[in-house]
Image: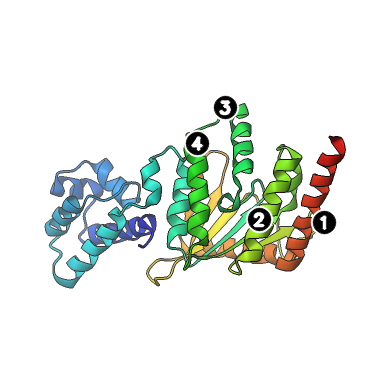
Amino acid sequence: MPSPYVRRRRLAVEIRKLRESRGLTTDDLARLVFHSRTKITRLENAQIRPDLAEIMNMLDALEITGSQYDRLLQLAREAAQKGWWDRYGMSMGPRQKLAADLEYNAASVRTYDQTAMPGALQCRPFIEALIKLDESQRSLNYQPERLTEARVNRQRELLRQGGPTYETILDECVIHRLTVPPQTMAAQLEHMVRVVSEQERITVRVLLHSAGIPGGLLPKSSFYLYTFPEPGDPPMAIVDTVTTDVILNQRAEVMRYIGMYDRLREAALSREASIAFLERVAKRLTDETGSRT
């Protein structure tokens, strides 16, 4: 199944092009199909799942026929599909829901994490520790038990046969600055080492404190890059902010983040050196915890 969200973005572009090619405003199209302007705007911004009957009515009103009609209706069907994450509603949190959707049919996922461990590679004790941190800030917008279950499912889907290649650049500061118990951080690092060691298409690269990043300014936030198997689905960048994810799919914007990622990758440790580094830190944390008991 293609990513429904990616298909919604593609359908949104097609609907907007059709409307503009006929010289119609969003108000004009809304009147033509007996919908509100707000609904047309949300459809053209990929903010809602399309209703097939409404899309068929819209294509008829715009006098679309033949192979173009069939192609757009198929696109709408794919955009309306539901994935495993939809059974959670918003109880898993909107950001994780979007990540699960995009990961599901991605060809590749590349992430730079400067404030968190990669969500799809977290072990259960670490997830539970993060939830406690969220609770202390009173910033929960999800149901903790559902988020934990969903994040475990994300990992299962990522590791399934035929899943995407996945590479994350992990800023070393995440290991030292997150105030989770040392034994929990050790368990998380050991978990990542185990996953990476068993799965060739999964890579973690550590960006050390001392690493200089060549070629320009430093990144201002974490970000995530996705490519998809079909040529009609362009690459996408998701930029992490405190309150929401910013979604970018304009080529020039995405290319800037790809360039930034390549610079970070050049500065980070190799796959093998990163595994060795994570193993050393996990052992040190375990030894320190043992010496205090």
Residue 214 in view: no
Image quarter in which the C terminus is found: top right
Is any atom of residue 238 visible in this view? yes
Cβ atoms at labels 2 and 4 below 8 Å apart: no
Q: Which residue is mark 3?
A: 138
Disc 2 marks which amino acid?
A: Met
Gap between marks 2 and 4 measured at Cα:
22 Å
Mark 3 or mark 1: which is in front?
Answer: 3
On residue 210, which mark appears? 1
Left or right: 49, with 183 as reference point: left
Q: Badges 3 and 1: C-beta atoms under 8 Å apart?
A: no
Label 1 – label 2 distance at C-alpha: 22 Å
Of mark 1 and mark 4, the one earlier in the sequence is 4
**Which structural element holds mark 4?**
helix
Q: Which residue type carries mark 3?
A: Arg
Quarter of the image containing the N terminus?
bottom left
| Neighbourhood count class around disc 3 (C-alpha, 10 Å): few under 14, some 14–19, many 20 upward | few
Q: Residue 76 location, x and y as percent?
A: 26, 58
Q: Earlier in the sequence, mark 1 or mark 2?
A: 2
Q: Is residue 23 above or below residue 38?
A: below
Q: Mark 1: which amino acid?
A: Ser
Of the numbered discs 3 and 1, the one sitting upstream in the chain is 3
Residue at x-position 62% and y-position 65%:
198
What's the distance in space between the residues labelled 3 and 1, CA to CA? 34 Å
Disc 2 target residue: 192
The disc, 2 or 3, on the residue closer to the chain's N-terminal end is: 3
Task: State how far apart marks 2 and 3 are (Cα).
Answer: 28 Å
- According to the picture, the residue beneath numbered tag 4 turns out to be 145
Which of pointers 3 and 4 indicates the residue nearer the eye? Answer: 4
